[in-house]
Amino acid sequence: MTKTQSRQSFVTSADGTRIAVTVTGQGRPLVISPGALNAAQDWQLLADALAPHLTIHAVDRRGHGASGDSLDHSLEREQEDIAAVLDLAGPDAVLLGHSYGGIVTLGLALQRPPAAFILYEPPVPLHGPVGGEAIAPFEEAVAEGDLEHALAFGTRNFLRMPEEAIEAFRHSPVWATRASMTPTWAREVRAIDAFGDDLDRFARLTMPTLLVTGEFSPPVLLDISQRLQEALPNSRLAQIPGHAHEAYLTAPETLAEEILSFVAGLSA
């Protein structure tokens, strides 16, 4: 894969927070809202794969990467951040939300429907709270500065990852980077738990929607995407074979093919 040239831009959100955006490529705009332990840089492999066809606007959500932050965090503030990036990208932008970033974009879509929508395994709390009683001990580990323990605890209790998967993750090159992002994870998990489990509210989202899943993603996330597909009237599911929740890192070319096929169908 040939790396393409990117540039960093900034937008100012409604509360004055400065939000960083990495812009790559040419063509119809695609705005990416990353998950809880991600930043724009994690999506660069996918951006490079899409660059000949789309202009990718990968967001550093507030508190991540080069973006600013504020003490007044809420899902609504994060939605305003993405809305500001959509203003930058233009009215025909396709909106992609991954994991927690999918929760942000689902809420935004109810107020400001995008031209087209891609959702990659948003953890709508259909099976009970994601954090619940585990949030307090997680925050204690963060407050003590033991971010690696916090990451292991969160992956075990928020993501329900098995121990062998956590151990493999611990030896991966992204472990330290993910650990450094744990200080904002508790507030994001709280936002997920407060999001609610009512899928009927999404029936009025009639824009073309692609729901992406990984073959080996946690069963709970696969079930949520299946039920979202049933709730969203103009949606379809696409599964990335042999991969899981992070195909943008592990199979960027395959994920790019699914996205380009979906976008091509918008003008067919």
Image: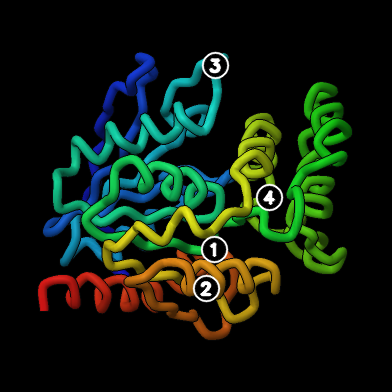
SS type, badge 2: strand
SS type, badge 3: loop
Q: How busy is the neighbourhood of tag 2: few (under 14 within 10 Å), some, or many (20 plus)?
A: many
Residue 173 in which image quadrant: bottom right
**Residue 175 to residue 61: above or below:** below
SS type, badge 1: loop
* Residue 41 shows up from this direction: no
Residue 70's spot in the image, x, y percent? Answer: 51, 16
Q: Is the Cβ of the residue at disc 1 closer than 8 Å to that at disc 2?
A: yes
Q: Which amino acid does label 2 sit on?
A: Thr
Residue 175 numbered mark, or none: 4
Q: Is the Cβ of the residue at disc 3 closer than 8 Å to that at disc 1?
A: no
Q: Which amino acid does label 3 sit on?
A: Asp
Residue 241 appears left or right of 236: right
Q: Mark 1 points at which residue?
A: 121
Q: Is the Cβ of the residue at disc 2 closer than 8 Å to that at disc 3?
A: no
Q: What residue type is labelled 4?
A: Trp
Q: Name the residue under label 2.
A: 213
Q: How busy is the neighbourhood of tag 3: few (under 14 within 10 Å), some, or many (20 plus)?
A: few
- Mark sitting earlier along the chain (3/1): 3
Residue 72 numbered mark, or none: 3
* Residue 130 shows up from this direction: yes
- Mark sitting earlier along the chain (1/2): 1
